[in-house]
């Protein structure tokens, strides 16, 4: 029975309905059922305004009529329905995820230890397949946690996981943060707990795959429930890699400090803990250039221990950095083998082929680009010219170190490398270290940059081998706005007066090249060097005129790569050390070729054209012993701490450096008196090693001539004409007897605009007005007698040098006093060795590298 009041007739009457109760009636105009409100209006959506017409009223969004005659849902109801659907979907997903986690936990068991404990050796091969070395035997000695000092344990926790004892097996927050930082370009970062790292090291492996990571999570959770934290920490300390082929903290204590872990101090333990972040990179003995980063990490560990109240601030303040001992590598890596293995490892990790920890597990077969014949030839050349010349009677000979590298210019393949006398006695690789100044071997990059950038002198003359500069020692370098404040000294403080760029290259004149670098723009010079192959982050590669003197500390291998680019007509190939890497029959992906035109061919070839003269008639004549066309440049660092020769034939580029280093402290040392020589120069032992090695390395191949395209607007006659001008106008003694070589015209007095608007002295006379003689009808060849124009030759004035003769400024051999005609490109017979050491070294008045 209805709850509504009933009418006497048994049906509803519109006029008699209870107030507020709607009723249904037939709409006379449409024949459809309508809803009648208490006012009698057929449609509540309409109202009568007294005009006799029904007007629609505005809807408030509630209970709007639907086609079926039922009230519609409100906006709030729609949102609530969608929310219920979403929540339901999320709950379903959560249930599925939970089910998956439960299933994974039940299905994934803790496996047996991986094969890391019995890992294979890595095999390193020459290009022909013969074995260079075997390495990778696991060096590990397990210890109980109780044998590890508590402070050392805590140092590891401070470095890797400070909440280890209180946290769960996995840290989702840290993992999420690490993933986000990696995705947003803030660097690859780890978010693993010590438990996860232990699972990876001991049970799984280092592969970076999703299945491995999923297994790691489940095993870590299960392990954390089944093993005490102390047992997990013990396993972690025994399986972690610390560098120096040391697995586990006991092996690390012996490798770095030569004592058992029980005797390791807190400071030493903090250093060992620091190594876990980057094992090889943080070895300050191997990479002294990383000392700043290592100290920062060491301080981070100790500061963390103070924060956790594991040591007191007073204890922390009293600690000094504990420098680790010498590396004691396996004897199987003696001689050059260890240096090669180290360089290959650095190459693979730097190019992302394989990470250091994975490589250390072993089992890899690595074919290098090195050629056995050339490698042996390089070792023999060093032995013949340096090692055999050392004497136990000369204490200075203990400081002698040698580095060398050889590259195929056409491919970038490294064919030979010399890292030091013996890897087991000297761990640092002299071919890859970046802490010695390259000296004047950098000068060719300045000239190449000048040609590449169409540079001009301050006076507007284009820079070519024939451009005339002022070679006065300590001449102030002039900028566009006046003196720069930089006035470098030449070797032995010698003044050369007016000389061509070609002669300045032969004699390695600092004053000329510092001014040239300023004319080109030091920043452009730096960019050219980087394009040729010098790393952008090379220390002291600064945009100032001093860049020309080689204050940068590129490695021997870096310089070889850059010189190979010059030999290859300006086409740069990034160096390659590895041809193939495989494991279990599968090859790893190697980086593709990285090549490009670093500088225009004319820039590289004109530089080569000048550098041939350095070998034939300049400071590098000892390199002529190679017996084939060659180009090169000598360089000597300040105080003879390093001497370089960098050179190339059309098919082989090689750089040799002799360095001075104290075997006990590692400090750089001067080499005055080493090998029985009063001075160590690039034109001495380095050039002789280069010549002997190059001749032997190319013995079975035909000699090739250089195919050179010189810069537009320059030919050899331009150089002869420029030299005639110097001899005709400045060769009467006025400019080479010291009267104008004492700085009167080189100190800015006449470069300040008094005689020409802001033009330096070297351009006031170029192109010079002919004073008293006409230019020769045919370019005068030096040494051929009186110029055709009637000028009177002046003995000894051919180079307008400070003493009237052109002595070898770099190799101290005496050299030729007359500039010989440009050498041919054919095979040149080896000259006798005319090296004559001076009795005592001259004083040095400049902090810049010598030539």
Image: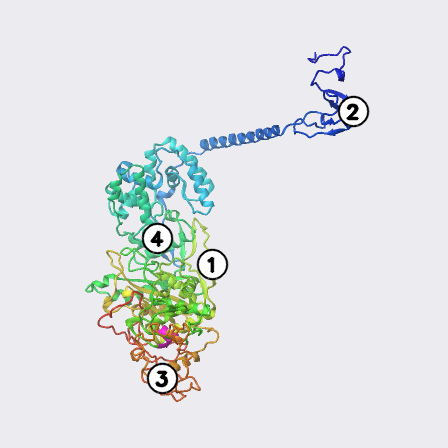
Q: Secondary structure at mark 1?
A: loop
Per the image, the residue denoted by label 3 is: 783
Write the start and end of the magenta stretch as one range.
498-506
Image quadrant for the N terminus?
top right
Find the distance from the CA under tag 2 to the CA under tag 4: 101 Å
**How many numbered tags mark residues here?**
4
Q: Which mark is residue 593?
A: 1
* Contact (Cβ within 8 Å) of mark 2 with mark 4: no
* Contact (Cβ within 8 Å) of mark 3 with mark 1: no
Q: Earlier in the sequence, mark 2 or mark 4?
A: 2
Q: Earlier in the sequence, mark 1 or mark 4?
A: 4
Find the distance from the CA under tag 2 to the CA under tag 3: 127 Å
* Contact (Cβ within 8 Å) of mark 1 with mark 4: no
Q: Residue furthest top?
A: 8
Q: Nearer the viewer, residue 342 or 115?
A: 342
Q: Secondary structure at mark 2?
A: loop
| Magenta segment, prevailing SS (helix, strand or loop) | helix
Q: Is residue 384 left or right of residue 25?
A: left
Which of the two marks, 2 or 4, is nearer to us in this view?
2
Quadrant of residue 273 in the image? Answer: top left
Quadrant of residue 833 in the image? Answer: bottom left
Measured as percent of width and height from the top left, residue 5 is found at 71, 12
Which of the two marks, 3 or 1, is nearer to us in this view?
3
Which of the two marks, 4 or 3, is nearer to us in this view?
3
Per the image, the residue denoted by label 2 is: 27
Q: Earlier in the sequence, mark 2 or mark 3?
A: 2
Q: Secondary structure at mark 4?
A: strand
């Amino acid at each position: 029975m209805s709850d509504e009041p009933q009418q006497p007739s048994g049906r509803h009457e519109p006029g008699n309905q209870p107030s507020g109760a709607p009723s249904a009636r037939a709409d006379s105009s449409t024949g459809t059922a309508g809803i009648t409100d208490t006012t009698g209006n057929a449609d509540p959506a309409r109202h009568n305004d007294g005009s006799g017409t029904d007007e629609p009223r505005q809807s408030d969004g509630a209970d709007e009529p639907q086609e079926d005659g039922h009230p519609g849902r409100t906006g709030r109801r729609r949102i609530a329905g969608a929310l219920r659907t979403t929540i339901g979907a999320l709950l379903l997903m959560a249930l599925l995820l939970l089910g998956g986690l439960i299933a994974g936990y039940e299905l994934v068991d803790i496996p047996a230890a991986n094969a890391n404990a019995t890992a294979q050796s890595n095999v390193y091969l020459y290009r022909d397949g013969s074995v260079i070395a075997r390495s990778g035997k696991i060096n590990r000695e397990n210890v109980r946690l109780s044998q590890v000092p508590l402070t050392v344990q805590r140092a590891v926790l401070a470095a890797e996981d400070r909440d280890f004892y209180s946290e769960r097996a996995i840290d989702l927050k840290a993992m999420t943060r690490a993933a986000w930082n990696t995705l947003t370009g803030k660097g690859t970062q780890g978010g693993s707990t010590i438990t996860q790292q232990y699972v990876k090291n001991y049970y799984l492996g280092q592969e970076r795959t999703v299945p491995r990571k999923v297994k790691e999570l489940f095993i870590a959770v299960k392990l954390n429930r089944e093993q005490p934290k102390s047992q997990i920490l013990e396993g972690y300390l025994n399986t972690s890699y610390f560098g120096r082929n040391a697995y586990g903290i006991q092996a690390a204590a012996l490798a770095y400090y030569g004592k058992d872990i029980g005797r390791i101090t807190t400071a030493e333990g903090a250093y060992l803990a620091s190594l876990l972040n980057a094992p090889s990179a943080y070895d300050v003995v191997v990479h002294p250039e990383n000392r700043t980063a290592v100290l920062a990490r060491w301080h981070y560990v100790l500061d963390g221990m103070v924060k956790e109240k594991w040591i007191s601030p007073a204890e922390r303040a009293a600690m000094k950095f504990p420098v680790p001992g010498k590396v004691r590598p396996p004897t199987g890596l003696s001689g050059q083998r260890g240096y090669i293995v180290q360089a290959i490892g650095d190459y693979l990790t730097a190019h992302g082929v394989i990470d250091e920890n994975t490589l250390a597990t072993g089992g890899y077969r690595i074919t290098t680009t090195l050629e056995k014949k050339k490698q042996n030839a390089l070792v023999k050349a060093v032995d013949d010219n340096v090692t055999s010349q050392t004497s136990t009677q000369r204490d200075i000979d203990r400081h002698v170190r040698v580095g060398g590298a050889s590259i195929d210019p056409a491919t970038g393949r490294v064919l030979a490398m010399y890292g030091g006398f013996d890897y087991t006695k000297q761990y640092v690789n002299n071919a890859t270290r970046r802490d010695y100044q390259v000296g004047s071997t950098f000068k060719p990059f300045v000239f190449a940059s000048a040609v590449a950038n169409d540079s001009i002198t301050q006076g507007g003359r284009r820079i070519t081998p024939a451009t005339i500069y002022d070679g006065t020692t300590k001449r102030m370098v002039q900028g566009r706005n006046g003196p720069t404040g930089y006035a470098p000294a030449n070797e032995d403080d010698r003044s050369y007066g007016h000389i061509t760029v070609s002669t300045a290259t032969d004699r390695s004149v600092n004053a000329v090249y510092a001014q040239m670098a300023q004319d080109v723009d030091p920043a452009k010079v730096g960019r050219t060097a980087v394009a040729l192959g010098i790393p952008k982050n090379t220390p002291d590669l600064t945009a100032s005129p001093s860049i020309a003197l080689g204050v940068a500390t590129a490695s021997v291998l870096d310089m070889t790569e850059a010189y190979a680019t010059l030999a290859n007509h300006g086409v740069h190939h990034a160096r390659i050390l590895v041809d193939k890497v495989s494991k279990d029959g599968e090859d790893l992906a190697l980086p593709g070729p990285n090549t490009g035109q670093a500088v225009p061919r004319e820039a590289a070839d004109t530089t080569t054209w000048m550098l041939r003269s350095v070998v034939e008639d300049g400071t590098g004549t000892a390199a002529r012993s190679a017996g084939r066309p060659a180009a090169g440049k000598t360089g000597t660092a300040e105080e003879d701490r390093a001497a370089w020769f960098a050179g190339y034939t059309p098919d082989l580029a090689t750089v040799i450096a002799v360095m001075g280093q104290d075997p006990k402290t590692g400090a750089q040392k001067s080499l005055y008196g080493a090998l029985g020589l009063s001075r160590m120069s690039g034109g001495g032992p380095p050039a002789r090693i280069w010549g002997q090695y190059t001749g032997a390395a190319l013995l079975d191949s035909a000699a090739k001539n250089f195919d050179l395209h010189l810069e537009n607007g320059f030919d050899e006659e331009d150089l002869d004409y420029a030299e005639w001008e110097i001899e005709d106008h400045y060769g009467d003694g006025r400019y080479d007897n010291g009267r104008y070589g004492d700085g009167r015209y080189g100190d800015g007095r006449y470069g300040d605009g008094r005689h020409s608007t802001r033009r330096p002295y070297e351009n006031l006379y170029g192109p010079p007005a002919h004073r008293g003689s006409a230019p020769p009808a045919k370019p005068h060849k030096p040494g051929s007698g009186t110029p055709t124009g009637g000028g009177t030759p002046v003995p000894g004035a051919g180079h307008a040098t400070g003493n009237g003769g052109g002595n070898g400024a770099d190799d101290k051999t005496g050299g030729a006093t007359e500039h010989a005609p440009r050498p041919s490109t054919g095979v040149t017979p080896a000259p006798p060795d005319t090296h004559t050491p001076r009795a005592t070294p001259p004083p040095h008045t400049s902090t810049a590298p010598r030539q």
